Image (tube, grey):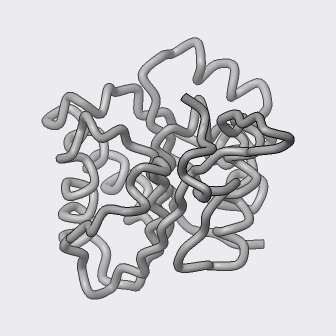
Amino acid sequence: MESGHALVIGGTGMLSDVTIWLNKKGYFVSVIGRRKERYHQLMEQIEHSHNISALLVDYHQTKELKQALKEAVETHGPYNLVVAWVHSSAPEVIPAILELQNQYQNEPFEFFHVKSHTRYYENETLIRPSNCVYHEIYLGFKAYKGHSRWLTHQEISEGVKDSIHHRRLQTVVGQIEPWDERPH
């Protein structure tokens, strides 16, 4: 059984199965979500409810997010594992998390950055602390018999859990190619 402090952004919605899985693996999980009702729905499925904490904050509110993250670290220790699904509308979130980790975490930590399929072709320059083991997880689509669809939350969570389990530096969940077959 693993242990440590995990942070899951998107962990009450799309990545709720990842939150549940990490909790079962023995992590204390700080989960970021915007809505209390989603957190309460998640808690109904949590096995070890004493090992989870809600950070009910909209990550677009950077000041509030930084404060919530800091309080979680001061209460439960630095994050050993970060799983982050952050929309491109909040580009300051990932640097804020890495900055916090740089201040509080001296040991190596793993950062699983969940990204949309469109970011697969971007050259991203992200300044990471030297103790950060950075993993990229790209969310693609499913194509079959001339049709395509976006991934379900369950397919996404299974792909993210598999990437964490195998510690892959880069994972594509579903498919990215052929680009012109993606759903519109």
Residue 155 in percent (x, y) is at 76, 45
Q: Is residue 172 above or below residue 139?
A: below
On screen, residue 25 above or below 142: below
> In the rendering, at what x and y percent does residue 29 appear?
56, 50
Residue 64 left/right relative to 114: left
Percent coordinates x, y for residue 26 in the rendering: 71, 61
So how many labels did they put on this image? 0
Quarter of image, res 46: top right
Most extreme residue toward the left, as rendered?
A: 63
Residue at coordinates 44% horizontally, 68% vertically from top-left?
Answer: 111
In the image, 18: left or right of 118? right
Work out which residue is located at the far right of the displayed protein and give it: 145
Percent across and percent down for residue 99 are 18, 64
Q: Residue at x 59, y 41 (%)?
A: 182
Residue drawn at (63%, 44%) of the image: 181
Q: Report which quarter residue 126 is drawn in.
A: bottom left
Asked if residue 103 is positioned above or below residue 133 in the image, the reply reads above
Q: Nearer the viewer, residue 148 or 56?
A: 148
Question: Looking at the rendering, in which quadrant would you find the C terminus?
Answer: top right
User: The N terminus lies in which quarter of the figure?
Assistant: bottom right
Kindly identify the residue that appears in the image at 75 percent across and 62 percent down.
25
Decide if residue 155 is on the left or right side of residue 7: right
Closer-to-camera residue (181/49): 181
Q: Nearer the viewer, residue 44 or 85?
A: 85
On the picture, is 165 further left or further right than 32?
Answer: right
